[in-house]
């Protein structure tokens, strides 16, 4: 019975319709709006669970497919489906939205119904991005997603929110326009907007090169990769806590997902030729951005830079495949890189989300994000301090936390391609620990820094629930990642076979 | 047996979770009972395991659960229990149990009582995971786990700036080691396509002559690369020069953990790891030489620093560094059994010395400067006597535990012929004198001579309570007897044969075995050897300098002011690291941020594009004046140009 339900449509449209319903309840009755929003968020998550529990891990084929012709003239279809890449990300999205609703509960002071609605609509759109198998459908969700985020930062954001939103919007839009051109070109060649048809389409190296760059631009902005990353720190600093959480936990992942769904399988030969470029940019993210993170004075900026550095492992893991293939002539070790990148995406969702929530907890009380305004928080907020140390350690990639799994796999994998790639990537062990634990030291430990810290109240039940859920997720994946990675194997193997087979005409 | 092994590991974890999460509910007594019972169960079961394996049981090597299955490679959590593991877990759980009991007294007035018990039990869990691992993943898990707890415990008194600085420093320096270690694991995976010990060790001999090109065009032996990378990890954890800088600072933590973590167990993880990896290290003489030279430098030069320290814990800390150097030297000459033997005896007597120092610190109301002590022997007889026994064991007095293990190392170095063995022999021999000198200096200054504390402290001086002294006594017993008891099985017998592999050309313990005729005759023979003469010389110098002519050290210090300056600044390691790495990376980060990120990318490219668009638009606007005659004029000009073009082309 379950399999007959249009499950993917449900997880996309239920939160969107729920969000609209929350809008109708409106701000006159905030309690009801919040209760409705929480119900919708939790139900959306529950609806998404069968995607995991009924998922067939033995096949790389798309599952839970739905197909309805949409614009027959251009053969655009409402085509949904998931595989081992997208399914974990959909669950992550649904999970994080619940947390964001809880996080905004008492904190957002004005237009609470609209705030909650924006996140619910955002949830549906993001899931749409992950579930779309039609390029135009993907593009619509991809662009539509910008609107709620634009509003979230623009309405509930900090003092420089207008600059930040414009920067965020223009950056992303610029990248996606090139992507659209590439998609239309691919349609002209294949007379189909099916992403899976694009995968099969033979293309010359020149075509692949141009299309690859278009995708690279579109997705590198999202990830974000150096040097198109500067929108992220600004957006994070100005965004409200929930906005930062979703931005870091989900929207960055869309960039990584785009490489797997578009750039790698559609233009494998170009990707193999230009892998050095992406790998270089990834290593710049790990080392250069790691150093930049070290000296940040604003907690949110620090975590934003840390996000960029951690996302470097995602792109590194995806592109190191080609180096391994060239070096060893086999794909042994390549799956570790791709799966490491995927695990890193999920894990970073939890950890960066948790860290932004932690900063939010402090900001709600002291109204400052500056590190120097804190110090000795452990004295007044011991429970919070325990969470912060846990998430800090996870961010530093401690074994037993999810942060370790992805980095470990990617480093092991990249060693097969080149000692020096692994060497630079492993620098994160030192840099990641340095910027995270130095932050923890300055904020959490020490004598009580000032009168604000002295008056702090420890986390309340709502905050404990929110942080405990994340802590559980972080530890679970760290201690037993197999359930997560086993759903990816088939899709990853399929991708590896595909991208090491030339598509040249 | 699997259930017993699981229980050994999980009992302390259970205690740690209960004490950590429900510390407030179960109260102080609840917290110490639940963790002590957990560790006690673990200890008793370890003894069962030890008996089982020394009784000739086959090594146990099984998986507990599959952490991840990828590309057909099983990454798992599993146990390898052989005689080496059995000796390690017994030592670890025994010292841990003693430290748990001692903590009841030492941390009596501390607000973080439950938290402390939770941490040390968690430490015990992580350490057991490390030594019982049957694969590199779990090894790394335990490795970083003990690092985490060490970080938490050094910074236990989180209000002290010096403590939280030291904890951060310890974690980061260890991470430098782990950086190499993780690359080493990656190299192992690349070479063997497995990270399971059994697979790797079985395939290792086939890889002996493999080369890799880390720098294009330069062939390096694969085994040398793997071993040196792994050893970098050991250098971090076991505090070998130049990654030793964190250990003296770790003394900012409470004394019980200095005994447990920073002397007896965690810092020996690197030694254990190299011994466990003996089938790999035996294949690379280059790597062994590196190990040997690093160990020799640490053994000698860190010992020197012990002579000039005035903080009771720091003297013992430098002594630990030096002794770790001895163990590393033993590894370098392939005397792995001697290294593990010294690790074990050292665990007992060094834990004893630290806990003794802690007992002194309690009695002195948390005064740690030895210049304000003196004559304590008559106030605290148990502490005094056990400390003396610990000192005698440390310096290698024939008959005491440290004598057997240290002498076997000296012998092994003597017979070794690998590169660096000559220097190593000189270093470890001179080190014997240095050890004796700093140990007796400490002993005389603290327990004998004039009482230099203030009147108030002196009036309240008394022996510490039983929870403190009983562990001292229980540790003093093995510090005296364990060497004589276990030298025969561990070194001469074949106890480690199923765990440690030594190739024929490196078998430096073989001559030692031939000359060995029982522990007693070994000790008697030791009385006439060069090491004992050096011990006596150290004792004599210390007695002369600190008992007969206490004015002399001051004079020597002034005479060699430059040398003293370098030594008191710890050979400048800290200052160089501070200015090169800490300040350097901050400056680099600032430069990248200010000039590249904010300046070039944001300033020129992003905002520059925005300004350019604005400028072009404002220029374009000038043309749209809204006056009809301007447009008419433009049309006429345009028409003229077009006509000209058509006509003249």
Image: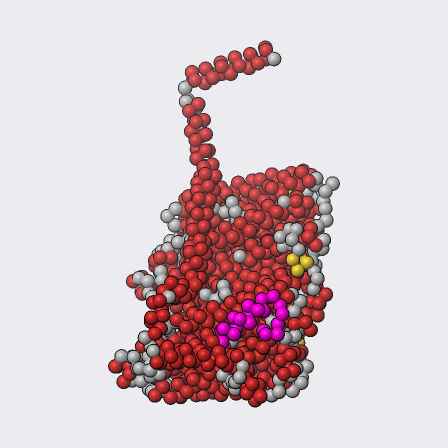
- Relative depth, front residue between B424 and A394: B424
Q: Residue furthest top?
A: B647
In the rendered image, is residue B270 in sight?
Answer: no
Which residue is located at x 63 percent, y 75 percent?
A: B508
State the extent of the magenta-drawn residues as a range. Answer: B413-432
Q: Position of residue A272 (x, y in %)?
A: 66, 47
Q: Position of residue A355 (x, y in %)?
A: 46, 60
Q: How many marks?
A: 0
Colouring scheme, one of rainbow, by chain, secondary structure, one colour: secondary structure
User: Is residue A231 shown left or right of residue A130?
Assistant: left
Which residue is located at x 72 percent, y 42 percent?
A: A504
Which residue is located at x 33 percent, y 65 percent?
A: A448
- Relative depth, front residue between A187 and B602: B602
Locate the C terminus of chain B and report the quarter of the image it occupies.
top right
Instruction: Indicate the quadrant where residue A62 lies.
Output: bottom right
Judged by its main secondary structure, the magenta piece is helix
Which residue is located at x 59 percent, y 11 percent?
A: B648
- Relative depth, front residue between A260 and B372: B372
Instruction: Indicate the quadrant where residue A404 lies.
Output: bottom right
Q: Position of residue B256 (x, y in %)?
A: 43, 78
User: Is residue A496 shown left or right of residue A316?
Assistant: right
User: Is residue A195 shown left or right of residue B243?
Assistant: right
Q: Position of residue A433 (x, y in %)?
A: 48, 61
In the rendered image, is residue A370 in sight?
Answer: yes
Locate the N terminus of chain B and report the quarter of the image it occupies.
bottom right
Question: Residue A42 lies in magenta, yes or no?
Answer: no
- Relative depth, front residue between B621 and B461: B461
Vertical comparison of B485 with B246: above or below? below
Q: Residue furthest left?
A: B455
Vertical comparison of B277 with A90: above or below? below
């Amino acid at each position: 019975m379950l399999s007959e339900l249009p499950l993917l449509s449900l997880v996309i449209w239920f939160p969107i319709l729920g969000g609209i319903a929350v809008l109708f309840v409106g701000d006159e009755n905030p309690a009801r709006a919040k209760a409705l929003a929480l119900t919708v968020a939790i139900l959306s998550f529950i609806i998404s669970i069968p995607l995991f529990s009924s998922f067939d891990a033995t096949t790389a084929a798309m599952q839970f497919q739905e197909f309805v012709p949409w614009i027959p003239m251009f053969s655009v279809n409402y085509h949904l489906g998931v595989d081992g890449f997208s399914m974990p990300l959909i669950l992550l999205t649904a999970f994080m939205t619940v947390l964001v609703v809880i996080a905004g509960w008492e904190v957002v002071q004005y237009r609470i119904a609209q705030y909650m609605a924006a996140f619910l609509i955002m949830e549906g759109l993001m899931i749409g991005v992950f579930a779309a198998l039609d390029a135009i459908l993907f593009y619509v969700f991809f662009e539509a997603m910008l609107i709620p985020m634009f509003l979230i930062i623009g309405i509930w954001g900090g003092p420089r929110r207008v600059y930040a939103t414009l920067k965020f919007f223009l950056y992303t839009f610029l990248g996606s326009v090139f992507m659209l051109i590439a998609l239309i070109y691919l349609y002209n060649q294949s007379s189909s907007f099916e992403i899976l048809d694009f995968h099969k389409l033979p293309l010359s190296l020149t075509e692949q090169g141009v299309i690859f760059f278009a995708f690279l631009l579109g997705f590198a902005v999202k990830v974000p990769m150096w040097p198109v990353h500067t929108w992220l720190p600004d957006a994070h600093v100005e965004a409200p806590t929930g906005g930062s959480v979703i931005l870091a936990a989900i929207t960055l992942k869309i960039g990584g997902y785009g490489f797997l769904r578009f750039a790698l399988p559609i233009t494998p030969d170009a990707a193999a030729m230009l892998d050095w470029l992406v790998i270089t940019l990834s290593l710049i993210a790990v080392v250069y951005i790691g150093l930049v993170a070290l000296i940040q004075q604003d907690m949110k900026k620090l975590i934003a830079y840390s996000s960029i550095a951690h996302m470097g492992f995602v792109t590194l893991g995806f592109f190191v495949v080609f180096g391994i293939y060239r070096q060893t002539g086999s794909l042994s070790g390549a799956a570790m890189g791709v799966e490491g990148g995927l695990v890193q995406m999920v894990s970073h969702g939890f950890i960066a989300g948790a860290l932004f929530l932690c900063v939010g907890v402090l900001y709600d009380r002291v109204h400052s994000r500056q590190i120097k305004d804190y110090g000795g928080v452990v004295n007044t907020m011991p429970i919070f301090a325990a969470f912060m140390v846990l998430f800090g350690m996870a961010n530093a990639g401690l074994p037993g936390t999810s942060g370790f799994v992805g980095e470990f796999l990617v480093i092991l994998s990249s060693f097969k391609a080149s000692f020096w790639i692994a060497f630079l990537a492993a620098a994160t062990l030192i840099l990641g620990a340095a910027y995270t634990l130095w932050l923890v030291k300055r904020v959490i430990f020490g004598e009580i820094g000032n009168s604000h810290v002295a008056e702090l109240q420890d986390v309340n039940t709502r905050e404990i629930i929110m942080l405990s859920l994340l802590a559980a997720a972080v530890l679970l994946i760290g201690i037993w990642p197999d359930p997560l990675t086993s759903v990816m194997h088939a899709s990853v193997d399929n991708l590896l076979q595909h991208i090491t087979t030339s598509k040249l005409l | 047996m699997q259930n017993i092994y699981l229980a050994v590991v999980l009992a302390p974890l259970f205690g740690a979770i209960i004490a950590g999460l429900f510390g407030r509910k179960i109260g102080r007594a609840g917290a110490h009972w639940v963790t002590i019972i957990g560790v006690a169960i673990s200890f008793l079961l370890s003894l069962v395991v030890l008996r089982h394996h020394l009784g000739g049981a086959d090594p146990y090597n099984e998986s507990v659960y599959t952490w991840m299955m990828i590309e057909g490679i099983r990454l798992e959590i599993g146990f390898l229990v052989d005689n080496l593991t059995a000796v390690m877990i017994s030592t670890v759980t025994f010292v841990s149990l003693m430290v748990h009991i001692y903590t009841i007294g030492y941390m009596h007035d501390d607000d973080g009582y439950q938290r402390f018990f939770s941490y040390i039990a968690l430490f015990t869990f992580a350490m057991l995971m490390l030594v019982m691992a049957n694969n590199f993943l779990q090894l790394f898990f335990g490795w970083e786990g003990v690092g985490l707890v060490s970080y938490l415990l050094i910074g236990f008194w989180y209000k002290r700036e010096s403590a939280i600085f030291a904890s951060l420093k310890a974690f980061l320096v260890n991470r430098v080691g782990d950086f190499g270690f993780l690359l080493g694991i990656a190299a192992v995976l690349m070479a063997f396509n497995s990270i399971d010990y059994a697979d790797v060790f079985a395939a290792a001999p086939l890889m002996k002559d493999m080369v890799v090109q880390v720098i294009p065009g330069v062939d390096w032996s694969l085994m040398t690369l793997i071993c040196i990378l792994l050893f970098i990890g050991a250098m971090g954890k076991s505090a070998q020069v130049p990654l030793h800088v964190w250990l003296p600072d770790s003394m900012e933590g409470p004394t019980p953990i200095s005994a447990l973590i920073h002397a007896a167990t965690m810092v020996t993880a690197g030694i254990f790891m190299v011994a466990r990896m003996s089938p790999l290290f035996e294949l690379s003489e280059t790597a062994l030489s590196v190990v040997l030279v690093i160990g020799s430098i640490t053994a000698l030069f860190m010992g020197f620093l012990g002579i000039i320290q005035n903080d009771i814990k720091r003297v013992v800390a430098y002594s630990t560094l030096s002794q770790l150097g001895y163990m590393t030297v033993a590894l370098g000459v392939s005397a792995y059994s001697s290294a593990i033997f010294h690790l074990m005896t050292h665990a007992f007597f060094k834990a004893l010395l630290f806990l003794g120092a802690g007992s002194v610190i309690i009695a002195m109301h948390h005064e740690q400067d030895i210049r304000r002590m003196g004559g304590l022997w008559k106030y605290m007889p148990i502490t005094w006597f056990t400390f003396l026994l610990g000192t005698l064991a440390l310096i290698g007095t024939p008959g005491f535990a440290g004598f057997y293990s240290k002498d076997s190392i000296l012998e092994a170095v003597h017979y070794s012929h690998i590169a660096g063995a000559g220097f190593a022999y000189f270093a470890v021999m001179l080190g014997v004198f240095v050890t004796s000198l700093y140990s007796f200096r400490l002993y005389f200054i603290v327990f004998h001579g004039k009482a230099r504390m203030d009147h108030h402290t002196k009036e309240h001086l008394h022996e510490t309570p039983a929870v403190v002294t009983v562990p001292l006594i229980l540790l003093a017993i093995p510090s005296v007897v364990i060497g004589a008891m276990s030298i025969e099985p561990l070194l001469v017998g074949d106890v480690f044969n199923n765990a440690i592999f030594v190739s024929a050309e490196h078998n430096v313990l073989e001559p030692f075995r031939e000359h060995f005729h029982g522990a007693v005759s070994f000790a008697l023979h030791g009385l006439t050897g060069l090491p004992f003469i050096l011990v006596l010389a150290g004792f004599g110098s210390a007695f002369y300098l600190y008992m007969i002519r206490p004015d002399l050290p001051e004079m020597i210090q002034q005479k060699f002011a430059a040398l003293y300056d370098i030594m008191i600044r710890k050979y400048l390691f800290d200052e160089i690291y501070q200015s090169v790495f800490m300040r350097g990376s901050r400056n680099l980060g600032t430069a990248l941020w200010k000039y590249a990120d904010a300046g070039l990318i944001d300033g020129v490219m992003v905002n520059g594009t925005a300004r350019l668009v604005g400028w072009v638009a404002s220029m374009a606007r000038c043309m749209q004046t809204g006056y009809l005659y301007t447009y008419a004029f433009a049309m006429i000009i345009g028409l003229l140009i077009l006509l000209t073009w058509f006509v003249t082309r």
